[in-house]
Amino acid sequence: MTSFSATDAAFAGFRIIRQRPMVIVVWTLVGLGVLVVFALAALLLLGSEFMTLAQLGEGEEPSPEVAMNLLLAMIPLILIGMPVGLIYAGVLIAGVNRAVLRPDEKAFFYLRLGADELRQAVVLLIQVLGWTGVYLVIALIVGLTVGFGALTSGGETPPAAGIGAMVGAIVLAVLVGAVLALFLMVKFSLASAQTFQTGRINIFGSWSLTRGRFWPMLGAFLLAFVFIFMISMAQSVFQVIGQVSVLSGDMMITAISVGVTLVISSLISTVIHVVAYAPAPSIYKAITPDDTAADVFS
């Protein structure tokens, strides 16, 4: 069985950033461009409702009538934004896979819009639906546990032992759900890389590729998560600075500060994306050194 270094996999995103810094710059600019286009589309499609949406971000509570009108006005934006956002995510995920698995394909800073990207969008959609199903199952189990505890109490104040048992059951259900989520995350983590490299959508082939490699893969992903958490804290600091600048009252200072904050926040988001998605193709590349090993289904 071909092995790999969990530490090397966790640092795969940082290697891309160190070796190809312009890739991160260009991807950030592309992301900002998509954000601007989406904001303009929202302005055109929502019209007067756009200001209402902006006020919601400031903590104002809309009336039920205003909320319903806003929801109806946002339907066209959602119908357009969801597939566009999915394809954009597919472009970035394919870009990370290409930078790791096909580093010689440097044109357009590893970004394309073709079959590879569409396949990545489909894989992402399947994964999102799958994770939604897992979340609903866990929520259902927790809800049934709470409901059963309330039912057995007969509608009266349950004894302390009953409350302890119910809380324990809820904690156990959450822990089991968390363990299940981690297990499935690792087992299906190579679906994106395998789909990219083989040129056809393959969700379940990842299950076999991860056999006997679960713990080092989990370690790599957890280490990458620690990095992402630390980077996210820095992003939060810049966002707070941007929010505080709005209180200055000076329009020029506010505009400059918000603009700088937006650029830095977008740059950090791009770094987080690369750090999050690079470990999987790095592992895939290490354990499938030839084309025959890459095409695994069973």
Image (tube, rainbow, N blue to C red):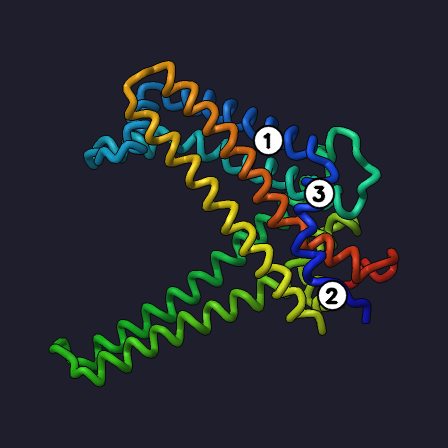
Give the SS element for disc 2. Answer: helix
Query: CA gap, disc 1 to disc 2?
Result: 32 Å
Q: Which image quarter is the N terminus in?
A: bottom right
Query: Circle 3 sits on which residue?
Result: 16
Q: Is residue 190 left or right of residue 59?
A: right
Give the SS element for disc 1. Answer: helix
Query: Circle 1 sits on which residue?
Result: 28
Q: Is residue 193 left or right of residue 156?
A: right
Residue at x 51% of width, y 37% of height: 82
Residue 92 point in image, percent of width and height: 64, 39
Residue at x 88% of width, y 57% of height: 290
**In the image, residue 32 above or below residue 92:** above
Residue 292: quadrant of the picture: bottom right
Please tell me which of labels 1 and 2 falls first in the chain: 1
Residue 148: quadrant of the picture: bottom left
Around disc 3, counting alpha carbons within 10 Å, would you say few (fewer than 14), some (14 to 19), or many (20 or more)? many
Residue 189 point in image, percent of width and height: 64, 59
